[in-house]
Amino acid sequence: MVDDPVVLNDWHPVARSEDVPEGSLLPVRLLEEELVLWRTGGQVYACQDVCAHRGTRLSCGAVDGATLVCPYHGWKYNSEGQCVHIPAHPEQTIPKRAQVQTYRVEERYNLIWVAIGEPTHDIPPFPEWDDPTYRKLLCGPYGAFELCGLRAIENFLDVAHFPFIHEGILGDAAYPEIEDYGTTIEPDGVLSKGVSVYQPNPYGTGQGGVVAYTYRALRPFTAYLAKESEGTRFSILFCVTPHAALSSTLWMWMALNYDHETPADELIAWQEKILNQDIPIIQAQRPALLPLGGQTDLLLNSDRTLIAYRKWLQEMGLRFGTVSGSRSHQ
Ligand code: FES
Ligand SMILES: [Fe+2]
């Protein structure tokens, strides 16, 4: 059982909107909780995936009108998690305890977001979403991978690995140097600007050049990047579903205001290729959880987004997914 309020009181994406069409249900795992999502009347609901009667998984059941029906003895639950019908005792008053825990659900960016507790922040911003000049492509879900989601966010914020892990795509081993850049911890997260790296073909023109990025850590499990270019703009909202401290699904919303011609499949395959280069290296990191507060690794100026990210996480008191919080979260 996760007991870290920082992650419990936060929104996490768990599925695409189209994964739960009207009248259907979907089991998901979030922060070690088994949940079932279900949709009725156009709304998605989430509740614990355990029937109050004899503990069977409600996700083995079905949606019937405005109720979720357990497959075992047919108890019906409403969207508030209250049992409203017990077929074996149709006349009996339904006991108060005949209910299941429900959770907050929001749909945004075509994703279904769930909070186990009371969310302290809104769902992270993605300004390109409402801007029709951007083409938006969802990459993912990828996983679930056996890796720490905080490590995946750190990898996303780390440009110094481009020339090595993504040689020929995002970097060039002949240009590994990272110039100094500015990082600040803002009220809404970590912000790095002017993070520059040489790329062999940054805009698909066949021409190499230095590209500057803006990076943001918006929430512990959500980050964002934007290329700092004039005219052509490219950005990514990167989100992690933390199923458990070492089990993560990854999502990327890619937004670009150019190239409306290349088929979506091709652009998504390109992101997948990059991600597939990242996954084994994240999984190979030790400790597998994020070291917070302990001096187990050596971060330098080129890692200052990561330094700020860790400081920010420490300031908010995050324990889940970290070495310091590992005893109760593995
Ligand atoms: S276990 Fe769900 S109705 Fe009996
Ligand atoms: Fe990478």
Image: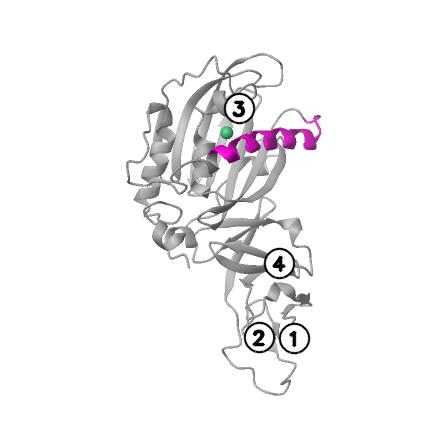
- The disc placed on residue 83 is 2
- The disc placed on residue 43 is 4
Q: In which quarter of the image is residue 208?
A: top right
Amino acid marked by disc 4: Gln
Looking at the rendered image, the disc whose residue lies closer to the viewer, 1 or 4, is: 1
Residues 284 and 205: in front is 284
Q: In this view, does 310 lie above or below 183?
A: below
Q: In which quarter of the image is the N terminus?
A: bottom left
Residue 25: give x, y in percent of width and height: 64, 59
CB of mark 4 near ligand 1 (< 8 Å): no
- The disc placed on residue 166 is 3
- The disc placed on residue 283 is none
Amino acid marked by disc 2: Cys
Label 1–label 4 contact, CB within 8 A: no
Residues 118 and 301: in front is 301
CB of mark 1 near ligand 1 (< 8 Å): yes
Q: Which range is magenta?
A: 260-281
Residues 11 and 75: in front is 75
Residue 325: give x, y in percent of width and height: 34, 49
Residue 11: give x, y in percent of width and height: 48, 50
Q: Quadrant of residue 232?
A: top right
Can residue 296 be seen?
Answer: yes
Task: Name the residue tied to disc 1.
Answer: 74
Crowding around mark 3 (Cα neighbors within 10 Å: few <14, some 14 to 19, many 20+) is some
